[in-house]
Amino acid sequence: MSSEPLSAPVTITWEVTLGCNLHCDHCLSGSGPGHQMPNELTTDEAREFIAELDRMDVFQVNIGGGEPFIRPDMLELLEELTSRDISTCVSTNGTQLDEATLDRIEAMDPLFLQVSMDGLQAENDAIRGDGVYDQVVDALKRLEDRDIGTTVNTVVTQQNVEDLSKIYDLAESHGAGLRLNRFRPSGRGEDTWDKFRLTEDQIRFLHDWIDDHPDVRTGDSFFYLNALGEVRNNTLKQCGAGSMTCLVDPAGDVFPCAFTQWDHLASGNVTDDGFQTAWDEIANLRSRIDDHEGCPAVAMGSSDPDGEDPQLRAILSGD
Amino acid sequence: MTTKLARPDHIKFRREAEGGLVYDHENYGYEDASMYEVSDTVIDVLEYIDGERPREALEKQFSPAVVETLLQRGVITNVE
Protein backbone atom coordinates (compact mmCIF):
# COMPACT_ATOMS: atom_id res chain seq x y z
CA MET A 1 0.00 0.00 0.00
CA SER A 2 0.95 3.62 -0.35
CA SER A 3 2.95 5.17 2.48
CA GLU A 4 0.18 7.72 2.96
CA PRO A 5 -2.59 6.67 5.39
CA LEU A 6 -5.86 5.98 3.64
CA SER A 7 -8.42 8.78 3.76
CA ALA A 8 -10.93 6.23 5.08
CA PRO A 9 -11.01 2.54 5.87
CA VAL A 10 -11.73 0.11 3.07
CA THR A 11 -14.05 -1.81 5.35
CA ILE A 12 -15.16 -1.55 8.96
CA THR A 13 -16.65 -3.88 11.53
CA TRP A 14 -19.51 -2.32 13.43
CA GLU A 15 -20.67 -4.11 16.55
CA VAL A 16 -24.15 -2.67 16.83
CA THR A 17 -25.04 -4.10 20.25
CA LEU A 18 -23.67 -6.29 23.01
CA GLY A 19 -27.14 -7.74 23.52
CA CYS A 20 -27.58 -11.32 22.40
CA ASN A 21 -30.06 -14.10 23.06
CA LEU A 22 -27.12 -16.53 23.34
CA HIS A 23 -24.16 -16.57 25.72
CA CYS A 24 -21.39 -18.36 23.84
CA ASP A 25 -18.33 -19.51 25.75
CA HIS A 26 -15.87 -17.96 23.31
CA CYS A 27 -17.72 -14.73 22.42
CA LEU A 28 -15.15 -12.19 21.25
CA SER A 29 -17.18 -9.28 22.60
CA GLY A 30 -18.49 -10.89 25.79
CA SER A 31 -22.08 -10.41 24.65
CA GLY A 32 -25.16 -12.03 26.13
CA PRO A 33 -28.77 -11.58 27.23
CA GLY A 34 -29.24 -8.13 28.73
CA HIS A 35 -25.64 -7.14 27.99
CA GLN A 36 -26.61 -4.06 25.98
CA MET A 37 -24.41 -1.07 26.79
CA PRO A 38 -26.41 1.82 28.27
CA ASN A 39 -24.99 4.22 25.69
CA GLU A 40 -25.37 2.21 22.49
CA LEU A 41 -25.97 4.42 19.47
CA THR A 42 -29.57 5.49 19.03
CA THR A 43 -31.26 5.04 15.68
CA ASP A 44 -30.67 8.69 14.80
CA GLU A 45 -27.01 8.51 15.83
CA ALA A 46 -26.57 5.31 13.85
CA ARG A 47 -28.17 6.92 10.80
CA GLU A 48 -25.84 9.90 11.05
CA PHE A 49 -22.87 7.55 11.36
CA ILE A 50 -23.99 5.72 8.21
CA ALA A 51 -24.27 9.03 6.39
CA GLU A 52 -20.67 9.80 7.37
CA LEU A 53 -19.52 6.36 6.19
CA ASP A 54 -21.12 7.17 2.85
CA ARG A 55 -19.45 10.59 2.68
CA MET A 56 -16.09 8.96 3.44
CA ASP A 57 -16.62 6.33 0.72
CA VAL A 58 -16.16 3.35 3.02
CA PHE A 59 -16.69 0.42 0.68
CA GLN A 60 -17.96 -2.24 3.05
CA VAL A 61 -19.48 -2.55 6.52
CA ASN A 62 -19.41 -5.81 8.45
CA ILE A 63 -22.16 -5.83 11.03
CA GLY A 64 -21.61 -7.81 14.21
CA GLY A 65 -22.46 -7.78 17.88
CA GLY A 66 -23.89 -9.27 20.03
CA GLU A 67 -26.69 -10.47 17.84
CA PRO A 68 -27.47 -7.64 15.40
CA PHE A 69 -31.12 -8.61 14.96
CA ILE A 70 -31.72 -8.08 18.68
CA ARG A 71 -31.73 -4.38 17.82
CA PRO A 72 -35.31 -3.41 16.96
CA ASP A 73 -34.06 -0.96 14.32
CA MET A 74 -31.59 -3.35 12.67
CA LEU A 75 -33.49 -3.85 9.43
CA GLU A 76 -34.02 -0.11 9.16
CA LEU A 77 -30.25 0.47 9.54
CA LEU A 78 -29.42 -2.24 7.02
CA GLU A 79 -31.79 -0.57 4.56
CA GLU A 80 -30.01 2.71 5.21
CA LEU A 81 -26.61 1.12 4.46
CA THR A 82 -27.63 -0.78 1.34
CA SER A 83 -29.66 2.10 -0.09
CA ARG A 84 -26.36 3.99 -0.10
CA ASP A 85 -24.76 1.09 -1.99
CA ILE A 86 -22.45 0.23 0.90
CA SER A 87 -21.63 -3.49 0.73
CA THR A 88 -23.02 -4.92 3.95
CA CYS A 89 -22.21 -8.25 5.61
CA VAL A 90 -24.17 -9.28 8.67
CA SER A 91 -22.78 -11.79 11.14
CA THR A 92 -25.70 -13.45 12.92
CA ASN A 93 -26.21 -16.42 15.20
CA GLY A 94 -29.04 -17.50 12.88
CA THR A 95 -31.73 -17.79 15.53
CA GLN A 96 -33.57 -14.56 14.72
CA LEU A 97 -34.17 -15.09 11.00
CA ASP A 98 -37.92 -15.46 10.71
CA GLU A 99 -39.58 -15.29 7.31
CA ALA A 100 -40.60 -11.63 7.65
CA THR A 101 -37.00 -10.71 8.44
CA LEU A 102 -35.71 -12.73 5.49
CA ASP A 103 -38.25 -11.09 3.18
CA ARG A 104 -36.85 -7.67 4.02
CA ILE A 105 -33.23 -8.83 3.86
CA GLU A 106 -33.79 -10.40 0.46
CA ALA A 107 -34.96 -7.05 -0.88
CA MET A 108 -31.65 -5.42 0.08
CA ASP A 109 -28.61 -5.31 -2.16
CA PRO A 110 -25.68 -5.57 -1.66
CA LEU A 111 -26.22 -7.55 1.53
CA PHE A 112 -24.73 -10.87 2.68
CA LEU A 113 -25.27 -13.07 5.72
CA GLN A 114 -22.71 -14.95 7.80
CA VAL A 115 -24.41 -17.55 10.00
CA SER A 116 -22.36 -18.84 12.92
CA MET A 117 -21.85 -22.57 13.42
CA ASP A 118 -18.99 -23.69 15.62
CA GLY A 119 -19.05 -27.41 15.00
CA LEU A 120 -21.44 -30.26 14.45
CA GLN A 121 -24.36 -30.59 16.86
CA ALA A 122 -22.57 -31.67 20.03
CA GLU A 123 -19.60 -29.31 19.70
CA ASN A 124 -21.68 -26.37 18.49
CA ASP A 125 -24.28 -26.67 21.24
CA ALA A 126 -21.62 -27.15 23.91
CA ILE A 127 -20.29 -23.68 23.03
CA ARG A 128 -23.42 -21.86 21.82
CA GLY A 129 -26.23 -23.51 23.80
CA ASP A 130 -28.60 -26.46 23.61
CA GLY A 131 -30.78 -26.54 20.53
CA VAL A 132 -28.91 -23.81 18.68
CA TYR A 133 -27.50 -26.18 16.05
CA ASP A 134 -30.99 -27.26 14.99
CA GLN A 135 -32.10 -23.63 14.75
CA VAL A 136 -29.13 -22.76 12.55
CA VAL A 137 -29.68 -25.74 10.25
CA ASP A 138 -33.33 -24.72 9.98
CA ALA A 139 -32.29 -21.19 9.03
CA LEU A 140 -29.86 -22.55 6.42
CA LYS A 141 -32.65 -24.66 4.93
CA ARG A 142 -34.93 -21.64 4.67
CA LEU A 143 -32.12 -19.56 3.13
CA GLU A 144 -31.50 -22.12 0.37
CA ASP A 145 -34.16 -20.74 -1.95
CA ARG A 146 -33.56 -17.12 -1.06
CA ASP A 147 -31.47 -14.76 -3.13
CA ILE A 148 -29.25 -13.91 -0.17
CA GLY A 149 -25.52 -14.64 -0.31
CA THR A 150 -24.84 -16.79 2.75
CA THR A 151 -21.79 -18.33 4.39
CA VAL A 152 -21.46 -20.51 7.43
CA ASN A 153 -18.97 -18.84 9.75
CA THR A 154 -16.94 -21.17 11.97
CA VAL A 155 -14.50 -20.21 14.70
CA VAL A 156 -11.95 -23.04 14.57
CA THR A 157 -11.36 -24.63 17.94
CA GLN A 158 -9.64 -27.63 19.45
CA GLN A 159 -13.05 -29.32 19.54
CA ASN A 160 -14.25 -28.75 15.96
CA VAL A 161 -11.13 -28.68 13.79
CA GLU A 162 -11.35 -32.34 12.83
CA ASP A 163 -14.98 -31.91 11.72
CA LEU A 164 -14.26 -29.15 9.22
CA SER A 165 -14.91 -31.40 6.22
CA LYS A 166 -18.34 -32.32 7.57
CA ILE A 167 -19.15 -28.68 8.30
CA TYR A 168 -17.99 -27.79 4.78
CA ASP A 169 -20.26 -30.48 3.30
CA LEU A 170 -23.18 -29.33 5.41
CA ALA A 171 -22.76 -25.72 4.30
CA GLU A 172 -22.41 -26.78 0.69
CA SER A 173 -25.53 -28.95 0.88
CA HIS A 174 -27.47 -25.79 1.74
CA GLY A 175 -25.85 -23.72 -0.99
CA ALA A 176 -23.72 -21.78 1.47
CA GLY A 177 -19.99 -21.20 1.51
CA LEU A 178 -17.74 -21.75 4.52
CA ARG A 179 -15.70 -19.08 6.23
CA LEU A 180 -13.21 -19.85 8.97
CA ASN A 181 -12.18 -17.53 11.74
CA ARG A 182 -9.34 -17.81 14.16
CA PHE A 183 -10.24 -18.11 17.83
CA ARG A 184 -8.70 -15.20 19.74
CA PRO A 185 -8.25 -14.31 23.40
CA SER A 186 -10.75 -11.46 23.52
CA GLY A 187 -14.06 -11.11 25.34
CA ARG A 188 -14.94 -14.46 26.94
CA GLY A 189 -12.23 -15.91 24.73
CA GLU A 190 -9.72 -14.64 27.28
CA ASP A 191 -11.19 -17.00 29.88
CA THR A 192 -11.50 -19.96 27.51
CA TRP A 193 -8.27 -19.44 25.57
CA ASP A 194 -6.56 -22.59 26.83
CA LYS A 195 -9.70 -24.68 26.44
CA PHE A 196 -10.42 -23.86 22.81
CA ARG A 197 -7.16 -22.82 21.16
CA LEU A 198 -5.59 -25.19 18.67
CA THR A 199 -2.65 -27.44 19.49
CA GLU A 200 0.38 -27.26 17.22
CA ASP A 201 -0.61 -30.52 15.51
CA GLN A 202 -4.08 -29.13 14.91
CA ILE A 203 -2.62 -25.95 13.42
CA ARG A 204 -0.67 -28.04 10.94
CA PHE A 205 -3.76 -30.15 10.19
CA LEU A 206 -5.73 -26.95 9.58
CA HIS A 207 -3.20 -25.56 7.15
CA ASP A 208 -3.22 -28.79 5.16
CA TRP A 209 -6.99 -28.75 5.16
CA ILE A 210 -7.15 -25.17 3.95
CA ASP A 211 -4.69 -25.95 1.18
CA ASP A 212 -7.05 -28.71 0.05
CA HIS A 213 -10.07 -26.39 0.16
CA PRO A 214 -9.14 -23.20 -1.68
CA ASP A 215 -12.76 -22.07 -1.85
CA VAL A 216 -12.98 -21.79 1.94
CA ARG A 217 -12.81 -18.18 2.97
CA THR A 218 -10.38 -16.96 5.58
CA GLY A 219 -9.23 -13.54 6.50
CA ASP A 220 -6.74 -13.90 9.26
CA SER A 221 -2.99 -13.49 9.49
CA PHE A 222 -3.01 -16.96 10.99
CA PHE A 223 -3.93 -18.44 7.64
CA TYR A 224 -1.19 -16.73 5.71
CA LEU A 225 1.02 -19.64 6.69
CA ASN A 226 1.16 -22.62 4.41
CA ALA A 227 1.11 -26.20 5.59
CA LEU A 228 4.86 -26.19 6.12
CA GLY A 229 4.75 -23.18 8.36
CA GLU A 230 6.26 -20.93 5.72
CA VAL A 231 5.02 -17.42 5.34
CA ARG A 232 2.66 -17.27 2.40
CA ASN A 233 3.21 -14.37 0.01
CA ASN A 234 5.10 -12.50 2.71
CA THR A 235 1.80 -10.99 3.81
CA LEU A 236 1.96 -12.01 7.43
CA LYS A 237 2.76 -8.51 8.60
CA GLN A 238 -0.02 -6.98 6.57
CA CYS A 239 -2.46 -6.74 9.41
CA GLY A 240 -5.06 -4.27 8.24
CA ALA A 241 -6.12 -3.18 11.73
CA GLY A 242 -6.03 0.58 11.88
CA SER A 243 -4.70 0.92 8.34
CA MET A 244 -7.39 -0.59 6.12
CA THR A 245 -10.06 -1.47 8.62
CA CYS A 246 -11.21 -0.70 12.15
CA LEU A 247 -13.86 -1.56 14.70
CA VAL A 248 -16.71 0.62 15.89
CA ASP A 249 -18.26 -0.61 19.13
CA PRO A 250 -21.96 -0.26 20.09
CA ALA A 251 -21.32 3.08 21.80
CA GLY A 252 -19.48 4.41 18.76
CA ASP A 253 -15.95 4.09 20.14
CA VAL A 254 -13.34 3.29 17.49
CA PHE A 255 -10.58 0.66 17.85
CA PRO A 256 -8.12 -0.93 15.38
CA CYS A 257 -10.04 -4.20 15.16
CA ALA A 258 -12.68 -6.32 16.91
CA PHE A 259 -10.06 -8.12 18.97
CA THR A 260 -8.14 -5.07 20.22
CA GLN A 261 -10.82 -3.23 22.14
CA TRP A 262 -8.52 -1.96 24.86
CA ASP A 263 -8.65 1.56 26.27
CA HIS A 264 -5.09 2.39 25.23
CA LEU A 265 -6.00 1.62 21.62
CA ALA A 266 -9.20 3.70 21.49
CA SER A 267 -9.09 6.55 18.98
CA GLY A 268 -12.30 8.51 19.38
CA ASN A 269 -16.05 8.25 19.10
CA VAL A 270 -18.17 8.50 15.97
CA THR A 271 -20.77 10.69 17.67
CA ASP A 272 -18.62 12.85 19.92
CA ASP A 273 -15.67 13.31 17.56
CA GLY A 274 -16.97 12.17 14.19
CA PHE A 275 -15.72 9.06 12.42
CA GLN A 276 -13.32 10.93 10.14
CA THR A 277 -11.52 12.41 13.15
CA ALA A 278 -11.37 9.04 14.88
CA TRP A 279 -10.01 7.40 11.72
CA ASP A 280 -7.37 10.08 11.22
CA GLU A 281 -6.31 9.56 14.84
CA ILE A 282 -6.05 5.79 14.52
CA ALA A 283 -3.00 6.05 12.27
CA ASN A 284 -1.10 7.25 15.34
CA LEU A 285 -1.81 3.94 17.06
CA ARG A 286 -0.31 1.77 14.35
CA SER A 287 3.15 1.74 15.92
CA ARG A 288 1.70 0.05 19.00
CA ILE A 289 0.28 -2.69 16.80
CA ASP A 290 3.16 -3.11 14.37
CA ASP A 291 5.54 -4.15 17.13
CA HIS A 292 3.70 -7.44 17.53
CA GLU A 293 4.51 -10.30 15.21
CA GLY A 294 1.69 -12.33 13.64
CA CYS A 295 -1.78 -11.36 14.78
CA PRO A 296 -1.29 -8.39 17.13
CA ALA A 297 -4.55 -9.16 18.90
CA VAL A 298 -3.36 -12.64 19.83
CA ALA A 299 0.11 -11.41 20.69
CA MET A 300 -1.18 -8.66 22.97
CA GLY A 301 -4.11 -10.67 24.35
CA SER A 302 -1.90 -13.63 25.19
CA SER A 303 0.45 -11.44 27.24
CA ASP A 304 3.30 -13.10 25.42
CA PRO A 305 6.53 -11.81 26.98
CA ASP A 306 8.10 -11.33 23.56
CA GLY A 307 5.13 -9.53 22.11
CA GLU A 308 4.64 -12.23 19.51
CA ASP A 309 1.71 -14.31 18.46
CA PRO A 310 2.71 -17.49 20.33
CA GLN A 311 0.91 -19.82 17.94
CA LEU A 312 2.68 -18.21 15.04
CA ARG A 313 6.05 -18.59 16.74
CA ALA A 314 5.30 -22.23 17.52
CA ILE A 315 4.65 -23.09 13.93
CA LEU A 316 7.56 -21.08 12.57
CA SER A 317 10.18 -22.30 15.01
CA GLY A 318 8.69 -25.50 16.36
CA ASP A 319 9.29 -24.50 19.96
CA MET B 1 -23.99 2.10 -33.55
CA THR B 2 -22.24 3.88 -30.67
CA THR B 3 -20.80 1.62 -28.02
CA LYS B 4 -21.38 2.90 -24.52
CA LEU B 5 -19.25 2.06 -21.52
CA ALA B 6 -20.16 2.09 -17.83
CA ARG B 7 -18.82 1.16 -14.41
CA PRO B 8 -20.28 -2.17 -13.18
CA ASP B 9 -22.24 -1.94 -9.93
CA HIS B 10 -19.76 -4.16 -8.10
CA ILE B 11 -16.88 -1.79 -8.83
CA LYS B 12 -16.36 0.98 -6.30
CA PHE B 13 -13.59 3.52 -6.25
CA ARG B 14 -12.26 6.55 -4.47
CA ARG B 15 -9.41 9.01 -4.84
CA GLU B 16 -6.58 9.00 -2.29
CA ALA B 17 -3.65 11.31 -1.64
CA GLU B 18 -1.61 9.22 -4.06
CA GLY B 19 -3.76 7.75 -6.85
CA GLY B 20 -6.80 5.89 -5.67
CA LEU B 21 -8.45 2.59 -4.81
CA VAL B 22 -10.66 0.34 -6.88
CA TYR B 23 -12.71 -2.18 -4.96
CA ASP B 24 -14.25 -5.11 -6.81
CA HIS B 25 -16.95 -6.83 -4.81
CA GLU B 26 -18.18 -9.20 -7.47
CA ASN B 27 -17.46 -12.07 -5.13
CA TYR B 28 -18.73 -12.39 -1.60
CA GLY B 29 -17.20 -10.77 1.41
CA TYR B 30 -14.24 -8.74 2.51
CA GLU B 31 -11.74 -11.55 2.01
CA ASP B 32 -12.92 -12.24 -1.49
CA ALA B 33 -13.25 -8.69 -2.62
CA SER B 34 -10.35 -7.49 -4.71
CA MET B 35 -8.80 -4.12 -4.13
CA TYR B 36 -6.28 -2.41 -6.33
CA GLU B 37 -4.16 0.65 -5.90
CA VAL B 38 -4.58 2.57 -9.11
CA SER B 39 -3.22 5.69 -10.76
CA ASP B 40 -4.97 9.04 -10.92
CA THR B 41 -5.80 8.26 -14.55
CA VAL B 42 -7.99 5.29 -13.60
CA ILE B 43 -9.87 7.42 -11.09
CA ASP B 44 -10.18 10.15 -13.71
CA VAL B 45 -11.76 7.64 -16.12
CA LEU B 46 -14.20 6.34 -13.52
CA GLU B 47 -15.23 9.85 -12.52
CA TYR B 48 -15.56 10.92 -16.15
CA ILE B 49 -17.86 8.00 -17.00
CA ASP B 50 -20.41 9.25 -14.46
CA GLY B 51 -23.09 6.70 -15.35
CA GLU B 52 -22.23 5.81 -18.92
CA ARG B 53 -20.30 7.37 -21.81
CA PRO B 54 -19.73 6.58 -25.48
CA ARG B 55 -16.51 4.61 -25.93
CA GLU B 56 -15.42 7.12 -28.53
CA ALA B 57 -15.63 9.98 -26.00
CA LEU B 58 -13.60 8.07 -23.45
CA GLU B 59 -10.94 7.17 -25.98
CA LYS B 60 -10.70 10.77 -27.08
CA GLN B 61 -10.49 12.06 -23.50
CA PHE B 62 -7.91 9.47 -22.42
CA SER B 63 -6.61 6.96 -24.96
CA PRO B 64 -7.79 3.78 -26.70
CA ALA B 65 -5.12 1.83 -24.82
CA VAL B 66 -6.31 3.03 -21.40
CA VAL B 67 -9.93 2.23 -22.24
CA GLU B 68 -9.06 -1.23 -23.57
CA THR B 69 -6.97 -2.05 -20.50
CA LEU B 70 -9.75 -1.08 -18.09
CA LEU B 71 -12.26 -3.08 -20.12
CA GLN B 72 -10.03 -6.15 -19.96
CA ARG B 73 -9.65 -5.77 -16.21
CA GLY B 74 -13.40 -5.46 -15.75
CA VAL B 75 -13.18 -2.03 -14.16
CA ILE B 76 -15.48 -0.72 -16.91
CA THR B 77 -17.83 -2.68 -19.10
CA ASN B 78 -19.83 -2.44 -22.28
CA VAL B 79 -23.44 -1.39 -21.80
CA GLU B 80 -25.81 -3.97 -23.25
Image (cartoon, rainbow, N blue to C red):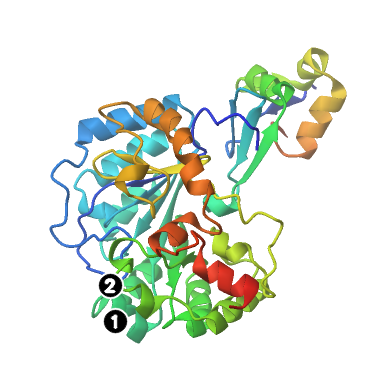
Q: Nearer the viewer, residue B58 or A92?
A: A92
Q: Is residue B26 above or below residue B65?
A: below
Q: Position of residue B16 (x, y in %)?
A: 60, 25
Query: What's the CA distance linking mark 1 and mark 2?
Result: 9 Å
Q: Which residue corresponds to the image point at 33% horizontal and 73% vertical from the top-left?
A: A138
> Image point 53% across, 40% down: which residue?
A244
Mark 1 secondary-structure assignment: helix
Q: Residues within 10 Å of mark 1 (few under 14, many from 20)?
A: some
Please, what is the three-letter code of the amino acid marked with disc 1? Ala
Image quadrant in which the N terminus of chain A is located: top right
Residue B80 appears in the figure:
no
Q: Chain of mark 2?
A: A
Horizontal and vertical percent for residue B51? 60, 23
Which mark, residue A25?
Answer: 2
Cβ atoms under marks 1 and 2 closer than 8 Å: yes
Mark 2 is on which residue type?
Asp
Say which mark, if any, is on residue A126. Answer: 1
**Circle 1 marks a residue in which chain?**
A
Near-viewer residue (A225 or B70): A225
Other-residue count near label 2 (Cα within 10 Å), few / some / many at <14 / 14–19 / ≥20? some
Between B79 and A215, the residue placed more toward the observer is A215
Where in the figure is residue A140, as x and y percent of width and height?
Answer: 39, 69
Left or right: B65, with A303 as reference point: right
Q: Nearer the viewer, mark 1 or mark 2?
A: 2
Which picture quadrant has residue A196?
bottom left
Q: Position of residue B67 (x, y in %)?
A: 80, 26
Q: Is residue A256 visible?
A: yes
